[in-house]
Amino acid sequence: MNHSDGFPGFHLVVLVGLTPQVITEALYVLMVRERSVVARISVLTSPEGADAVGNALLCGQVSPLERFCREYGFNRNRIGFVSTDIHAIWPRRTATGGPGMAAMDGLFERLAGWCGGEEMPVVACVAGGRKDMAVLFAQVFGLLARPDDRLVHLLASPEFENLAEFFYPPLQPSSLAVHRPGHGVVFLNTAEARVEMIDIPFVRLRTLLDEETRRGVISLESARNRVQREVESLNPSLRIDIGHRVVRYHGSETLLPPKEFAVLLFFARCRRDGFGPGGNGWIPGGELDQPDCVQRLEAAYRETTGGQSQFRDHGWVPRGRDGRIVFDELRIKITHAVSKIKALLGSAHPGRVYARSTRAGKEYGMEMDPAHMMIVDDEVSPNE
């Protein structure tokens, strides 16, 4: 995004370890090469990194940041960057210590604020910092990033990379005297220095977030769990285990009583096979006593109970003395079973059976894509 009237500028968020050079290198690419406006800089780092950044860029009038602005004609006062913009949220480096929950939640809270509401677009640079910092940063950024936010990495010429004397390619090339172990002093011409900014592709999940998650007022772990549930609901995988009468869905499993499991199995098979007048597995309430439906219901119940004597299908489909099906009693049985399935699985469970009203009356069925359902019979009789 180039200079334009009314554009407030980018917010440059930089992950820094012990090399503050990545800040001025990012500014060089954005402001000189891309001719973009950077109106604010925020740094995420460790206590050691905070000292390095403060000492290198915020001390005196001859800091590399001040020199960069003077050389290229930028107004330093228009770039918001003071000591309070350096956030030491990572603990000091140890041999085994990770970032810790406090650091992760702090990162999440800050990024949520910077990527929220009417805040200016963020350019997030992960060229510096430890690997655990970069991985976590990219993950959290994927949750919160808006369409105009960018995640980038920097690539500097190998001979200038991590060089303490090099902060950006100067307007007027100069020679740097660098000590190389085993080679003595080597002179480098800054005219040969190259700094490239690479956009890192990532999946943006912001549209799946609820308001609390977008605002960062919950923990990162809670945010992950909420987003995971949203993602899973987009492509659910349901496993109906006949041998154990268990419905499994992404790590959770629910044991259903025989009658309720039989009803769920019946409608799952109707959905899978496209059974029913509409060819979509939905059965009108007035057709539950049709021979094909009754045959499927009784088959599902026999398979569910495994032929156990106490659960034979006698009386499951109610019939009168003349052998005819008692429709009202059957409809009540199905209705009660559907209600109990909803109570046991939960109203938001993708594998539940629904009862919906149409112009022709009530119909029953499952909304889940049959491609995401697996019906398994491992020939293990359920424990009662």
Image (cartoon, rainbow, N blue to C red):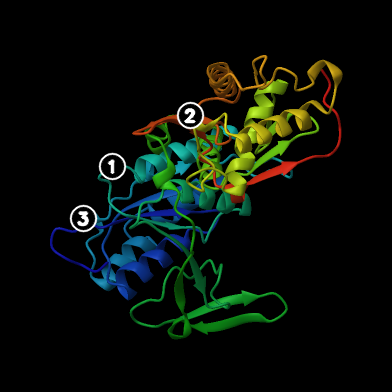
Q: Is residue 7 visible?
A: yes
Residue with the mark numbered 3: 8
Mark identifier at residue 20 = none
| Mark 1: secondary structure | loop
Q: CA distance from mark 2 to mark 1?
A: 52 Å
Residue 335 screen position, x and y as percent: 53, 21
Q: CA distance from mark 1 to mark 3?
A: 14 Å
The answer to which image quadrant residue 170 occupies is bottom left
Question: How dense is the environment of label 3, judged by Cα within 10 Å: few (below 14), some, or many (20 and up)?
Answer: some
Q: Is residue 190 above or below residue 22?
A: below
Q: Is residue 218 visible?
A: no
Residue with the mark numbered 2: 286
Q: Residue placed farthest to the left in the image? A: 5
Question: How dense is the environment of label 2, judged by Cα within 10 Å: few (below 14), some, or many (20 and up)?
Answer: some
Q: Residue at x 73, y 28 (%)?
A: 301
User: Of tags 2 and 1, which is closer to the observer?
Assistant: 2
Residue 318 screen position, x and y as percent: 65, 18
Going by the numbered disc 1, the residue's amino acid type is Gly
Asked whether, in this view, residue 42 is left or right of residue 279, the answer is left
| Mark 3: secondary structure | loop
Q: Which numbered disc, 2 or 3, marks the residue that appears first in the sequence?
A: 3
| Mark 2: secondary structure | helix
Q: Residue at x 67, y 14 (%)?
A: 321
